[in-house]
């Protein structure tokens, strides 16, 4: 890779500094082995970047994430909300209903709230795929969600100032 391309790539992956950042995280208890790892990935990233004003709330499952995120957003206390959940495909159509509910709920909140709502809901075919994405062989999507929250708040503040 040329030096110029590498510099452009590095700039894209550098997180901006967001003064006074406050983030709410709503985390599903269902599949807590996975959601706990995603949550830890997000919290570790915020700590590494020096952000301390992070509030975590738990809801029973992925369907309840939309309600939890809506309540956090309406409180006016947060610059961004992260929805953390995990749905693993089973033998019934329940998987599809839960995934649709969470996806559409997050999209609705992003369209109606004045802050970014970050979607960190794993939708996998099996437990191993979820483990791989929750700090395993592939990555930690919780870390990526925290990065997205920082970038989106920076984006919003840049537009509004």
Image (cartoon, helix red, strand yellow):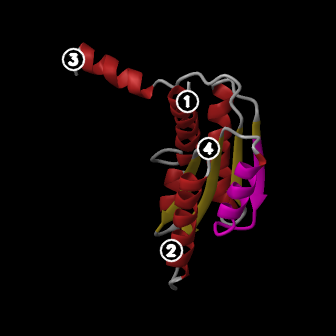
For marks 1 and 2, the one nearer the N-term is: 2
Indicate the secondary structure of the residue bearing disc 4.
loop
Return the x and y of residue 105 as percentages of the image width and height. 58, 64
Identify residue for label 2. Answer: 89
Q: Nearer the viewer, mark 1 or mark 3?
A: 1
Q: Earlier in the sequence, mark 4 or mark 3?
A: 3
Question: Which x, y percent locates residue 59?
Answer: 75, 62
Which of the two residues, 140 or 155, is positioned nearer the viewer here?
155
Mark 1 = which residue?
A: 160
Foreground residue, 103 or 34?
A: 103
Q: Is residue 88 visible?
A: no
Mark 3 residue element: loop
User: Which residue is found at the position 58% from the left and 21% from the top?
Assistant: 17
Residue at the disc numbered 4: 115
Residue at left 33%, top 17%? 7
Vertically, is 61 above or below 95?
A: above
Q: x%, y% of residue 116?
A: 58, 45
Looking at marks 4 and 1 on the same chain, the residue that comes earlier in the sequence is marked by 4
Label 1: which secondary element? helix
Q: Give the Cα distance between marks 3 and 2.
A: 43 Å
Residue 67 - label = none
Q: Are marks 4 and 3 in contact (CB under 8 Å)?
A: no
- Neighbour tally class for label 3: few under 14, some 14-19, many 20 plus, Cα within 10 Å: few
Q: Which residue is mark 3?
A: 2
Range drawn in magenta: 55-74
Residue 137 drawn above or below residue 67: above
Measuring from the top left, give residue 49's x and y in whole percent: 63, 25
């Amino acid at each position: 890779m040329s030096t110029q391309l590498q510099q452009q790539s590095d700039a894209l992956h550098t997180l901006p500094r967001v003064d006074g950042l406050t983030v709410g995280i709503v985390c599903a208890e269902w599949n807590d082995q996975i959601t706990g790892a995603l949550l830890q990935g997000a919290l570790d990233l915020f700590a590494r970047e020096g952000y301390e004003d992070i509030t975590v709330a738990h809801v029973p499952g992925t369907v309840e994430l939309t309600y939890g995120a809506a309540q956090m957003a309406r409180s006016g206390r947060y610059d961004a909300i992260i929805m953390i959940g995990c749905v693993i495909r089973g033998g019934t159509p329940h998987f599809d209903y839960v995934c649709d509910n969470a996806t559409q709920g997050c999209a609705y909140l992003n369209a109606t709230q004045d802050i970014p709502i970050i979607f960190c809901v794993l939708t996998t075919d099996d437990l191993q795929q979820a483990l791989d994405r929750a700090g395993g062989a592939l990555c930690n999507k919780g870390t990526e969600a925290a990065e997205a929250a920082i970038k989106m708040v920076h984006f919003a503040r840049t537009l509004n100032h």
